[in-house]
Amino acid sequence: NAGVMQNPRHLVRRRGQEARLRCSPMKGHSHVYWYRQLPEEGLKFMVYLQKENIIDESGMPKERFSAEFPKEGPSILRIQQVVRGDSAAYFCASSPPGQGGYEQYFGPGTRLTVT
Amino acid sequence: ILNVEQSPQSLHVQEGDSTNFTCSFPSSNFYALHWYRWETAKSPEALFVMTLNGDEKKKGRISATLNTKEGYSYLYIKGSQPEDSATYLCAPLTTGGFKTIFGAGTRLFVKA
């Protein structure tokens, strides 16, 4: 059973470009969480999704950031018009169906560098 | 906003020492508490999920307790080994919510 997969592992974008980060949850998991780790900071919640639904996006910046988890395929975190401050490690995690009581399984992260 | 505090921020111990750290959180609307272990250059790995007041969980030399009434959890490591060196994160969840708020973590360094 493959773990949570994220790609790419490293992504370099110039200011103003778009970044697309992908997350494939573990088999049987229908819940996906995205987190951001800024340099020298801890993990910050961004968004929680179930298939075709955004459940809680209270941690997402109001502009330029969006997330989806379609019926088929991976979850996508999209950052439009990236700025230097978006440089961070972005982790996704998945968990089985059920409200919050299950541990989350983390992917290896995508390290985004904006030049 | 859920305020999660972990202490100490970092801890240096010798191999063989036993150690413990604290996670404090608001006790209202408590649903569950997660503990994770995060090694450098890797991704967080789940240690425990705790839900009931008085819960005690154990995995090898690591154990945890939970007090939901006063809003704290302790993580204990018995006979620390260099491979225990990592950041230990706690994350409480509240009822009706799905947002996971992580503490800043306790960074443990175990010297051989």
Image (cartoon, coloured by chain):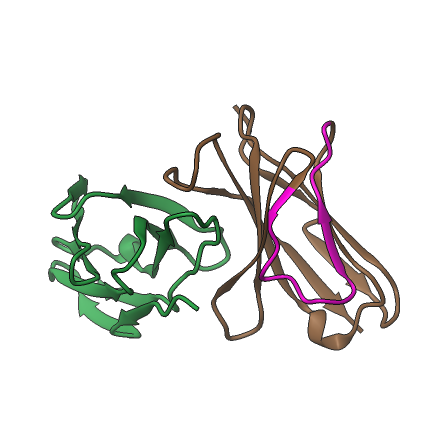
Front-most of residues A102 and A26: A102
Q: Is residue A23 magenta?
A: no
User: Which color has been applied to chain A in this rendered view?
Assistant: brown
**Numbered disc total:** 0
Q: Is residue A69 magenta?
A: yes
Percent x, y of residue A107: 55, 44
Residue appearing at x 43%, y 38% in the figure:
A99
Q: Is residue B60 visible?
A: no
Q: Quadrant of residue B49?
A: top left
For this view, does B27 lie left or right of residue A51? left
Q: Which residues are magenta?
A: A54-71
Q: Residue furthest right?
A: A16
Vertical order, B59 against A113 (above or below): above
Q: Main secondary structure of the magenta part?
A: loop
Residue appearing at x 29%, y 69% in the figure:
B6
Vertical order, A110 against A82 (above or below): above
For this view, does B42 lie left or right of residue A87? left
User: Which color has been applied to chain B in this rendered view?
Assistant: green
Percent x, y of residue B28: 28, 59
Q: Is residue A84 visible?
A: yes
Residue appearing at x 36%, y 70% in the figure:
B3
Front-most of residues A85 and A48: A48
Percent x, y of residue A73: 73, 31
Q: Quadrant of residue A55?
A: top right
Percent x, y of residue A15: 85, 72
Task: Check the picture and name the quadrant holding the C terminus of chain A.
Answer: bottom right
